[in-house]
Amino acid sequence: MSASWFALRVRAQHERVAATLLQYKGYEVFLPLYKSMRSWSDRSKEVHRPLFPGYVFWKCDSNNAGPLVLSTPGVLGIVRAGRTPLPVDSEEVKSLQSIDIHALAAQPWPYIRAGDRVRIEYGPLAGLEGVLVRADNAARILLSVTLLRRSVAIQVDASHLRPVREVSFSTAATAVATANFSA
């Protein structure tokens, strides 16, 4: 069986240590990083931070996903379904490695997929909410008029979108109660 990539869960802020220790043990690992500005009271500095905090990619034969890896300081476990380690799509890892090799600018972004409710954050349509129909560079969003049971599809730059988080019932009830008392 050929080697596959797996995601290892690691302790917060221990991604580099875990990756380095795994490399010393002879494993092939990949820790994608991005550049970020960090400010302190006396200075600002460009730092490299993990693109996926709490995770390191590890290449291994799935039959050999053993105790040596799990005994590595900082490693919490392998991402699994039940007792079966789940391999990461090798094409996705290749894409991340390509970004790293070519030193392209990357940054973490919320995961959005077709069917998710999104809000446009930038541009002339900022503040509008709709349902994402197609997610690529030019995302297509449906804006609906519920009363008329009609929708309009618009195309926007995917980088202008953020997922809309569902409001919990208690938060919504508090907002309604506050609005009623202030009126």
Image (cartoon, rainbow, N blue to C red):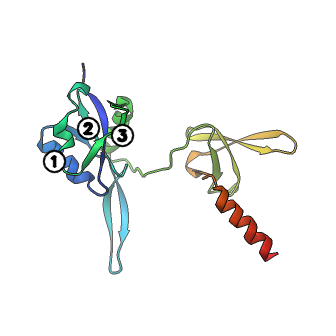
Reading the image, the residue beneath label 3 is 96
Q: Secondary structure at mark 1?
A: helix
Query: Can you give x and y, in whole percent of width and height, for residue 156 in the image?
Result: 64, 45
**Identity of the residue furthest to the right in this view:** 148
CA gap, disc 1 and disc 3: 21 Å
Circles 1 and 2: CB atoms closer than 8 Å: no
Q: Residue at x 62, y 56 (%)?
A: 121
Amino acid type of disc 3?
Leu
Report which residue position mark 2 lands on.
Answer: 58
Instruction: Please tell me which residue is depicted at 80% across the width and 70% down the height of the picture.
Output: 180
Residue sitting nearer the eye, 100 or 6: 6
Instruction: Tell me: residue 18, above or below residue 96.
Output: below
56 vs 141, left or right, is left
Q: Return the mark for residue 21.
A: 1
Q: Residues within 10 Å of mark 3 (few under 14, many from 20)?
A: some
Tell me what residue is drawn at x 20 percent, y 33 percent: 66
Where does the C terminus fall, quadrant-wise? bottom right
